[in-house]
Every structure is written in structure tokens, then in C-alpha cells.
Image (cartoon, grey):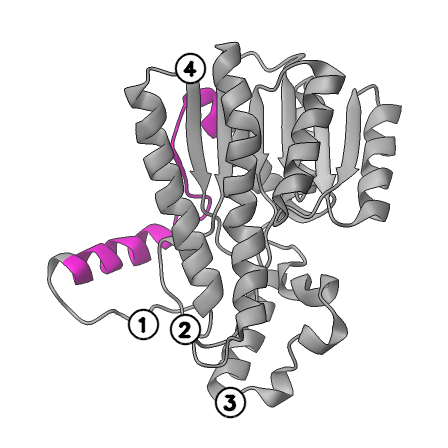
Amino acid sequence: MHDLKNKVAVITGAADGIGKSLAIKAAAEGMKLVLADIDTKKLDQLVTELAASGTEAVGLKVDVSMAEDVTALANLAYTTFGEVHLLINNAGVALAKNAWETTQKDWDWVMGVNLYGVTNGLRAFLPRMLTAGQEGHVINTASIAGLLSEPSMAAYNVSKFGVVTLSEGLHHDLTLRQAQIKVSVLCPAWVKTRIAEADRHRPADERIDLTKLDKVTAATGTSMFKAVQAGIEPEEIAEATFAAIRDGRFYIITHPQTMTGIRIRMDDILGNRQPTLLPI
């Protein structure tokens, strides 16, 4: 899509971080917005700010892991604007744990938001988008962790690899049907967001206590927290995303230096080598 003015965008995880920057960028492009987040206070504040600047925007509290919540979001979008052109499945969470310390509740939480949040979005919106027969675009937010496997991030890695392969298959499915809907998968590395504090939305007894993890996992978690704090600004991710929408580009790699790691991983596979431990 090239002309985004008056087109309708739906963005999940929109109240903060990357999602908020995507919403602000979409508003600057003249789009109408349907925004979702689990944080009602921040979501309402953003919708109010956008409306004050002249953007048509509505918001809804949504837990993307719940299919009925995402269906309600789709109903709101089509009731309010009658169409959807850009779907950004962006909501995400993270935690630092190795595979044997990751509890079932941890898996359910991470997979529910990061992977099922995307599948719920596709089921709720794509049939209507396809029926409309209009030009459209789907952005699924993965991570560089969907292309590279870092230690102590078992559930997060699995969820993000899932989003990447889901998006690749979706691209093929839509291409084979000659649909006018493009797909992109967003794979950023370190970005200044609150992703390292994502478990603030979990019950207190399910939050991570780094002091109770083994030293390797705790050290990795600490390093990743520092890397996030030193990351690039979310606005850069939004710019890269909208550039990809205009170019019709599938892979959105926002940190060029990560290409080296991706190449090493591919060489490991093709050369039948042990996986290389890449720097964080």
C-alpha cells in the first residue's frame, strides 16, 4: 500500500513502546485507528491525545490471548469504520528462563500473547479483509529471537520462531490465492521498551524473581534488561515498518548488525555444525 490516508489500521499492544510509536506514525499518515491494549489507562490516554490532534481513533481493552477479546476488537473496527486495511498484530511479552525452569503457566502466558495473539488476530480479521477484496497489509511482530536462538529465553524463542514461520506460510497462502493483502514480519533486536517488565501484568506469584533463578539464567536476564535499555528508539521501528508497507517487503530487519548472526545460524545448519552461541 502506498496511499494510507483515510485507510483503517488496527494495532494491538498499542498503548506503549513499539505499538504506541506505530499508532502515532499511522496517525501521521492520515489513517483511522482502532487500538487495543491490556493497559486501559495508557490506552485511553493515547486515544484521547490522538483524537485531540484530529485523528479518528477508538480503543478497546483486549487480552490478545483470548479469542473472544480479539473478535470483539474486530467487531468494533468494522462497526466503527466498516473496513480494515492494515492489521498489526504487535502485542508481546517476554521472560528470561531456561527450558527446565519455565513453568506451564509461563508457557501459557508467553505463547498465549506472542503466538496465539497473532493467530487470534488472523482469524478475527483476515476473512473480512479478504471478502472486501481491497488492498491490505498484515504486520506480525516477531523479534530477532524468531531468527536466532539465545539462551535462557526458551518460551520467548519458541513463540517468536512460531510467528516467523506462521507469517511465511501466510504469505504463501495469500500469494497462491492472488489476494491483494501483503504480509510482513517485524524482527527487531533491542528496542527501548518495557518488554523486560512485561510480567507486571501477571499475578504477583507468577512474576519472575531473578534471585531464585540459577546464576546463568539470572545473568542472561540482567544482560538482556541492560541491552533493552540501551536499544534504539521505538520511533525507528515505526519508520522501518511503514517503509516496508510501502515497499511490500516481507522481512523487516531493523538492526542491520543482526544479519551477521542470521548468516552464521544458516551456515551452522547448512554445514551441519553445532549451534553458535551468538553475543547478546
Q: Which residue is mark 4?
A: 180
Q: Which residues are magenta?
A: 244-269
Q: Residue at x 30, y 29 (%)?
A: 172
Secondary structure beneath label 2: loop
Q: Residue at x 47, y 65 (%)?
A: 155
Disc on the earlier residue, 1 or 4: 4
One can see residue 222 in this view: yes
The reply to whether discs 1 and 2 touch (Cβ–Cβ < 8 Å) is yes
The reply to whether discs 3 and 1 touch (Cβ–Cβ < 8 Å) is no
Q: Which residue is mark 3?
A: 215
Marks 2 and 3, how far apart at CA: 13 Å
Marks 1 and 4, how far apart at CA: 40 Å
Q: Position of residue 52 (x, y in %)?
A: 89, 25
- Between tags 2 and 4, which lies in front? 4
Question: In which quadrant will I find the C terminus?
Answer: bottom left
Q: Which residue is mark 1?
A: 277
Disc on the earlier residue, 3 or 1: 3
Q: Which residue is mark 2?
A: 151
Mark drawn on residue 156:
none
